[in-house]
Image (tube, rainbow, N blue to C red):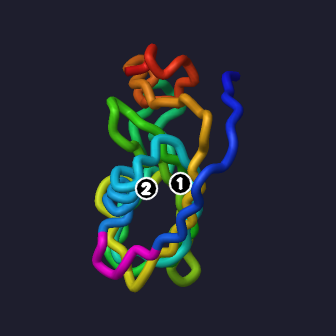
Amino acid sequence: MEYAKGRIGRVFTVRIDHGDDLILELIKLAELENIESAVFMLLGALKEAKLVTGPKENKIPPEPLWFSFGDAHEILGIGDIFLKDGKPKIHLHTCAGRGDNAKLGCLRGESEVFMVVEAFVFELEDISARRVADEEQGFAPVNFGRVSDQE
């Protein structure tokens, strides 16, 4: 286990509108406001999206198991923002439901908003975390080394 201690800085309440791409809008917010570390939660609906709902097999690096939808689903999500290669990287897990069916997974790729998504972003201060690619594991975990070591 590794960790870093910090505190909550600025807090943003964000409305993302019908037709917008959820992940791109979160990246845009991070760039406009120079957010390097944050956690967020959100609620609303997506018209279409792709989720990774687990690995196809229990091996590393994992081969993703995909679920996609093209009709409106209600969503709840929690995620974080950390820099990867100097740019904001969104890591978002969400539950998407429609009728009696619900799926939970990591939202990746296009994510078109249906009606509205409301996001609540909590900036983290004094956290020098960055995402650093780990080819052996097949993803970019959060690294808590010194900032100068990570860029």
Amino acid tagged 1: His
- From the viewer's perspective, tell me whether residue 25 is left or right of residue 137: left
Q: Pinpoint residue 44: horizontal percent, then vertical percent.
A: 50, 77
Front-most of 123 and 134?
123
Q: Pinpoint residue 139: horizontal percent, then vertical percent.
A: 43, 30
Give the residue at x 43% y 81%.
116
Front-most of 150 and 19?
150
User: In the rendered structure, are the residues bearing label 1 and label 2 in contact, judged by CB atoms less than 8 Å apart?
Assistant: yes
- Tell me, for residue 107, which label it has, or none: 2
**On-image quarter of the C terminus:** top left
Circle 2 sits in a helix, a strand or a loop, which is it? Answer: strand
Mark before the other along the chain sequence, 1 or 2: 1
* Residue that label 1 marks: 93
The magenta segment = 15-20
Asked whether residue 69 is in view, the answer is yes
Amino acid tagged 2: Leu
Position of residue 36 relative to residue 40, above or below, is above
- From the viewer's perspective, tell me whether residue 110 is left or right of residue 22: left
Task: Give the alpha-carbon distance from disc 1 to disc 2, as whole Å.
Answer: 6 Å
Which quadrant of the structure image shows residue 10? Answer: bottom right
Which quadrant of the structure image shows residue 100? Answer: bottom right
Q: Pinpoint residue 61: horizontal percent, then vertical percent.
A: 43, 26
Position of residue 24 relative to residue 112, above or below, is above
